[in-house]
């Protein structure tokens, strides 16, 4: 009789446990679903340019006041076939970008250089020069590149002596087009380096304003 009561009690306990388990909340999953954060997405050229549209870039003086020798080295504008030197633009502000044809960010930067000229009203006292630093590219391909993209300023294949001067006087990074290196040469021939990376037309306008005003 006692054994029968124990069996009934054990059966009742099993029923109670089963009912409680059915009524309790579902257990949390052992692994949470992955969380995708927008902050982890790589910035695009458009977002970078938009973010810097009203930022003044801080140029860094790259040489002493004396004009470097490479200012005298002749270069050929592939668009016109005419030769020029940096000294030909004495008394003007010169903006130089080193680039390569196959680089997407170089093209983005050149689009901004074109917009810069429009923002400034195409001033006569600002000269833009794009120097191709890829030894595998030539004048014919560079002319085709500039014409196809509607770029209307000076384009030249960098001469070897100019390439050496850029690397030795400033930094080897000036021969790495995808870094979007740029130099400003003021009216007195002093050279200033701009930070690497894409620079919007708006930020370039703010940065060049004091040089153009002198």
Image: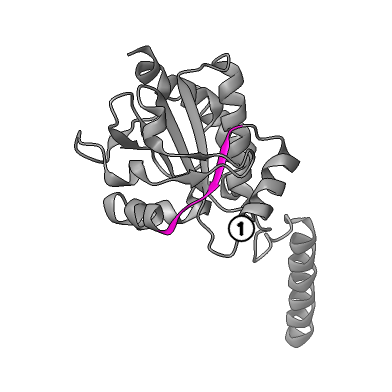
> SS for tag 1?
loop
Residue 11 rendering spot, x and y as whole percentages: 79, 76
Magenta residue check for 154: yes
Left or right: where 91 falls relative to 80: left
Query: Up-down: is 180 above or below 67?
Result: below
Q: Residue at x 69, y 62 (%)?
A: 29
**Residue 65 higher or lower than 137, as above or below:** above
Q: Is residue 48 left or right of residue 152?
A: left
Between 141 and 113, the one nearer to me in the picture: 141
Residue 65 appears anywhere in the view:
yes
- Residue at the spot 62% in from the left edge and 53% down from the top edge: 139
For this rendering, which residue is in front, 156 or 30?
156
Percent from the top left, x then y, of residue 183? 39, 38
Image quadrant in which the C terminus is located: top left
Is 49 on the left-hand or right-hand side of 59?
A: right
Looking at the rendering, the stretch of residues picked out in magenta corresponds to 153-160
Left or right for 37, reference 182:
right
For image coordinates 19% across by 38% down, the residue present is 64
Looking at the picture, tell me which residue is in the foreground, 174 or 84: 84
Classed neighbour count for the residue bearing mark 1: other residues with Cα under 10 Å, few (<14), some (14–19), many (≥20) = some
Give the residue furthest to the front.
82
Which quadrant holds residue 148? top right
**Is residue 182 on the magenta stretch?**
no
Find residue 26 and report its horizontal and vertical position in percent: 74, 58
Q: Is residue 37 visible?
A: no
Q: How many marks?
A: 1
Provide residue 81's location: percent of width, then percent of height.
Answer: 61, 42
- Residue linked to disc 1: 138
Compared to 10, does 196 lie above or below? above
The colour style of the image is: one colour
| Residue drawn at 42 percent across, 39 percent down | 85
């Amino acid at each position: 009789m006692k054994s029968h009561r124990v069996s009934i009690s054990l059966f009742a306990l099993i029923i109670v446990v089963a009912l409680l388990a059915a009524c309790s909340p579902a257990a949390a999953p052992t692994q949470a679903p992955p969380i995708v954060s927008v902050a982890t997405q790589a910035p695009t050229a458009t977002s970078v340019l938009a973010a810097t549209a009203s930022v003044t870039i801080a140029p860094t003086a790259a040489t002493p006041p004396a004009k470097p020798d490479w200012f005298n080295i002749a270069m050929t504008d592939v668009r016109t076939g005419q030769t020029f030197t940096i000294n030909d633009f004495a008394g003007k502000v010169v903006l130089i970008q080193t680039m390569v044809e196959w680089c997407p960010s170089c093209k983005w930067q050149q689009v901004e250089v074109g917009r810069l000229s429009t923002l400034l009203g195409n001033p006569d006292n600002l000269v833009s020069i794009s120097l191709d630093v890829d030894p595998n590219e030539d004048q014919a391909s560079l002319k085709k590149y500039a014409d196809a993209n509607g770029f209307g300023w000076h384009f030249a294949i960098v001469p070897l002596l100019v390439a050496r001067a850029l690397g030795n006087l400033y930094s080897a990074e000036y021969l790495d087009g995808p870094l979007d290196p740029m130099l400003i040469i003021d009216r007195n021939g002093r050279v200033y380096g701009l930070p690497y990376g894409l620079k919007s037309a708006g930020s370039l306008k703010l940065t060049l304003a004091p040089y153009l005003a002198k």
